[in-house]
Amino acid sequence: MDSKKITLITGGIRSGKSRYALSLAQKMNGQKIFIATAQAFDESMSVRIKKHQEERGEGFTTIEEPIYLAKAMSALHQESDVILIDCLTFWVNNLLYYFKEDVGKIRQQFDLFLDVLANPQRQIVIVTNEVGLGVTPENELTRTFIDELGFINQRAAQLSDEVIMMIAGLPQFIKGVNRHEPMDYSFSRNTANQ
């Protein structure tokens, strides 16, 4: 399983992306780093982040980095063997917020991130959302978000060794070979809502 360098996991909301990425990374050998891009802007997001932290357990060292993802990845010591990034969706949202929708500045961060992916030094598992299946929204900011997330998803997928799309908790292998064991579905209804 450790022969792969980059795995991109995409899918819709509540499709099982994070759970699958976590189970995949847990099976990889070596020290594991979890890079969290989400920020708790409200109470429900705080609860969601807390649940994800509990689900990870102590097997990961967590780094919170909402904006400078490439810098965080590059600063890691060589002894870290696995990076799990969750997720590009929140990252793009944060970039739009902090850079005031300046697409030029956002694309600079994309380029830095893609440079790191182009020469991976360790196993990388990336979670993102698939936003290309819905209708085009009326709101300009939402259209910009969809365009930018779609752009970085496509570029990350090109650089990935495998791309997996989650549908209703089931992995669909889009790129690469299915080398993974099935996900453990023995979770309760409560954890299914995470």
Image (cartoon, rainbow, N blue to C red):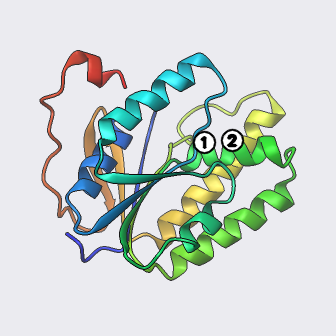
* Coordinates of residue 147 in the picture (x, y in percent): 70, 48
On the rendered structure, is 16 left or right of 2? right
* Coordinates of residue 41 in the picture (x, y in percent): 67, 27
x 34%, y 33%: residue: 54
Relative depth, front residue between 108 and 140: 108
Query: Residue 150, can we see it?
Result: yes
Label count reads: 2
Q: Are marks 2 and 1 in contact (CB under 8 Å)?
A: yes
Name the amino acid type tagged 2: Asn
* Coordinates of residue 126 in the picture (x, y in percent): 44, 56
In the picture shown, does residue 188 fall above or below 13? Answer: above
Residue highlighted by disc 1: 90
Few, some or many residues within 10 Å of mark 1 (<14, 14–19, 20+): some
| SS of the residue under disc 2 | helix
On the rendered structure, is 67 left or right of 65? right
x 24%, y 54%: residue: 26
Q: Which mark is residue 93?
A: 2
| SS of the residue under disc 1 | helix
Few, some or many residues within 10 Å of mark 2 (<14, 14–19, 20+): many
Name the quadrant of the C terminus.
top left
In the picture shown, does residue 145 fall above or below 177? Answer: above
- Residue 28 figure quarter: bottom left
